[in-house]
Image (cartoon, grey):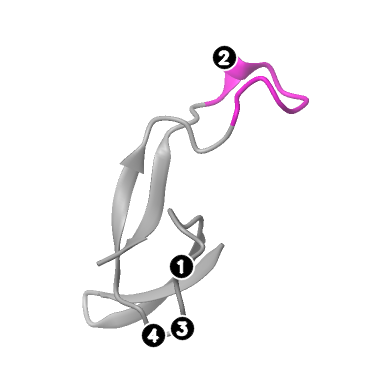
């Protein structure tokens, strides 16, 4: 997991998200990478079809 800070309309925004590698450190520049499944839809208490499982992870540039 990583806390990433970026700007939207001149305002600093922070987001918490998954990273693509453990080889990342504070201050590294990252970019969002689309992933079809952020986690296994079969694991959990909700029916898999009740949610979308795609999203973005942070990848070092």
Q: Residue at x 30, y 81 (%)?
A: 11
First in sequence: mark 2 vs mark 1: 1
Q: How far is disc 4 from disc 2 in space, using C-alphas? A: 37 Å
Magenta span covers which residues?
Answer: 40-51
Dot in front, 1 or 4: 1
Q: Position of residue 28 (x, y in %)?
A: 35, 79
Residue underneath mark 3: 26
Q: Nearer the viewer, mark 2 or mark 1?
A: 1
Q: Residue at x 50, y 38 (%)?
A: 38
Name the residue that disc number 2 marks: 49
Badge nearest the viewer, 4 or 2 = 4
- In front of the other: 54 or 9: 54
Q: Are marks 2 and 1 in contact (CB under 8 Å)?
A: no
Find the distance from the CA under tag 1 to the CA under tag 4: 12 Å
Does 28 sit left or right of 8 as displayed?
right
Find the distance from the CA under tag 3 to the CA under tag 1. 11 Å
Instruction: Give the quarter of the image for residue 5.
Output: bottom left
Please tell me how crowded label 1 is: few (under 14), some (14-19), or many (20+) other residues with Cα within 10 Å. Answer: few
Disc 3 or 2, which lies upstream in sequence?
Answer: 3
Identify the secondary structure beneath mark 4. loop
Of badges 3 and 2, nearer the viewer stands 3
Observer-side mark, 3 or 1, equals: 1
Query: In the structure shown, which secondary structural element does the residue marked by tag 3 occupy?
Result: loop
Place of residue 54 in the rendered image (x, y in percent of width and height, measured from the top left): 43, 33
Residue at mark 1: 23
Residue to which mark 4 is pinned: 27
């Amino acid at each position: 997991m990583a806390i990433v800070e970026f700007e939207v309309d001149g305002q600093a925004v922070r987001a918490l998200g998954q990273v693509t590698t453990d080889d990342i450190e504070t201050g590294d520049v990252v970019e969002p990478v689309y992933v079809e499944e952020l986690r296994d839809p079969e694991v959990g208490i909700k029916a898999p079809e009740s949610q979308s499982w795609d999203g973005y992870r942070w990848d070092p540039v």
